[in-house]
Amino acid sequence: MSRYAKTLEQMGIPTAPCTAINVSEYVRGWNMLYESGMPLRYTTFPLPIAGTTREVHEGYVNGNDPLTGRPIMHQIVDALTRPLTREEQSTESAKGVLEPRLLPPATEEDLQELFRAKDWTDYLPVVLPTEERVAAMLKGTSHKPFEVVKTLAWPGGGRRLTVEKVAVSAVMAGAKPEYFPTILAMATMAPFGNSTTSMANMIIVNGPVRKEIGMNSGIGAMGPHNRANATIGRTFTLLSKSAGNLHAGVTTFGSLGSNLQYNNCCFAENEEALPAGWDPLSVQSGYKREDSVVTVATGWIYHSCVGELVTTYPPQLLIRDYMRSLTGMGSAALLCADPLVAGILCDQGFASKGQLAEWLSRNVRVPAGQYWGNGITITGVANLAAQGIEPFATWQKMPPDALIEPFNTPANINTVVVGGQTNTIWFITDFMVRKGVSIDSWR
Amino acid sequence: MPDLGAQSKTTGKVTVLNPACSSSPVERAPLTPRTFSSLDGKTVFLVDIGWGGPKAGYDVLDIMQGWFARNIPSAKTVLVSKKGPFAQDDPDLWKRIKAEGDACIIGISC
């Protein structure tokens, strides 16, 4: 919102931006320094804003700013009329934060404590990134240490993520140099998901690199049972926190947080166990089978089917039932299916992942009232409905008990085959799969 | 994996690389001068950015509009919703406010 307020101020319109208390520190500090550059005159409101009554809202408007203690409406009028202070007229930019390449020498114990104090870790011990260890990691790629992998746009500050910075986080996570091309490809998708809704990421690896670096796609692939899976995924979080400067309550605001962020559910697809006609996720993304690819997905929900399949209820029906509990936001779903489940689905007539997605798109129906009963849906698409954009406008006019098909984009319903064929188990998630990234180009 | 190195063996201390990146603040921009000391006779736009859906911030701004009617009745207030999702810019609305308004209240971000 600060960019809208800044635009209006620069057009000569005095503006009073209003924000909820959860981001009040961020907008006055980080956002002002790195995003807007303008000392906007914010007024702070208590939470909740959405999902509460008009009486509560009336209390806010007639009450006080929880930060300043001043009557909210008097403060807003003041923000629009009070002459500017010298500070508010200033055009003198703040100085940037220059981070030295090396930290001052210290004992191992003190450095571990420093890394924790800086919130650069996940609070598990890290491997200290000595010059020798980072140099060894850099041998895992032909790319130069100071090549910029990505300039991190969020939360601002123009942080240039170099190959060497990625190597530092990879060392900290306990990765091997042979994992480094995969980690560099993954780093192009950094930082991790950041929302008050406590989103998370999932990292899926396809292609020959899986075998080359010993990733697990079989028994326990989604659990803590493999060094490559564990440390590649962990690097994503350490990178986001240290190089990306994402810190809870300062630049990230996930209310509950997500335990998946410890290693971002990193695993390899069990391509060898795909049913005939089913393509790996990377091939669905436009790559060839011989390409090595990492895919980052973003979402929230992670349901297990819990028990094995039974012959009286085909798996697609149970998957359909479970998908009814997902929000349908963006039509996104990601099925993680054991090869045994994939085989049964194939026997049920789904000759490809795409055919399964088409069937689920047509058959997952939820009451319109349920669809509109979730705040993420309201925030994401209710305004589109109000502007007449379809299908949201039609869905919003429907009675609460009328059924709609929220997964209306089959391309956003993806399937990954993973697991060790010890049971007919699957997970359904609402993770939105983003475009895969070539690992080979980072070798 | 290489050990902590010779430096550690001789001094008990280690030199490590800094995982943090340098940052550059954006250019500082001043607020626009306040040219009126009250909102009497002014046109104030109240803009809902849509966070939380069309009935969350909008409802708060609607109550604010009532406050203006009671407390600064000579001020004209215009309550509008920005187009698109909350993160989508709406340049046409900003132009309208520039053309028709004197001040703006905008919110509510969470």
Image (spheres, coloured by chain):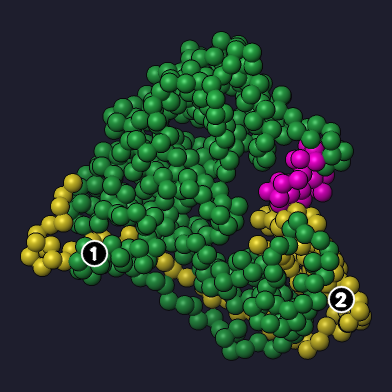
Chain colours: A green, B yellow
Q: Can residue A441 be seen in this view?
A: no
The number of discs equals: 2
Name the chain letter of the residue that bears numbered label 1.
A
Q: Where's the C terminus of chain A, which quadrant?
A: top left
Q: Mark 2 points at which residue?
A: B67
Q: Where's the N terminus of chain A, which quadrant?
A: bottom right
Crowding around mark 2 (Cα neighbors within 10 Å: few <14, some 14 to 19, many 20+) is some
Say which residue appears at 48% left-offset and 48% top-offset.
Answer: A259
Which residue occupies the foreground of this view, A371 or A42? A371
Name the element at disc 2. helix
Residue A24, how many percent across, how many down?
61, 70
Q: Please give the label number shown on residue A109.
A: 1
Q: Is residue A241 above or below residue A36?
A: above
Q: Please give the label number shown on residue B49.
A: none
User: For the residues marked 1 and 2, what is the alpha-carbon distance in whole angstroms?
Assistant: 59 Å
Q: Please, which residue is most extreme toward the left here?
A: B10
Identify which amino acid the numbered label 1 is placed on: Glu
Of the residues tagged 1 and 2, which is closer to the observer? 1
The span shown in magenta is A368-395
Q: In screen coordinates, is A14 left or right of A272?
A: right
Which residue occupies the foreground of this view, A31 or A53? A53
Name the element at disc 1. helix
Q: Is the magenta stretch mostly helix, strand or loop?
A: helix
Q: Can residue B6 be seen in this view?
A: yes
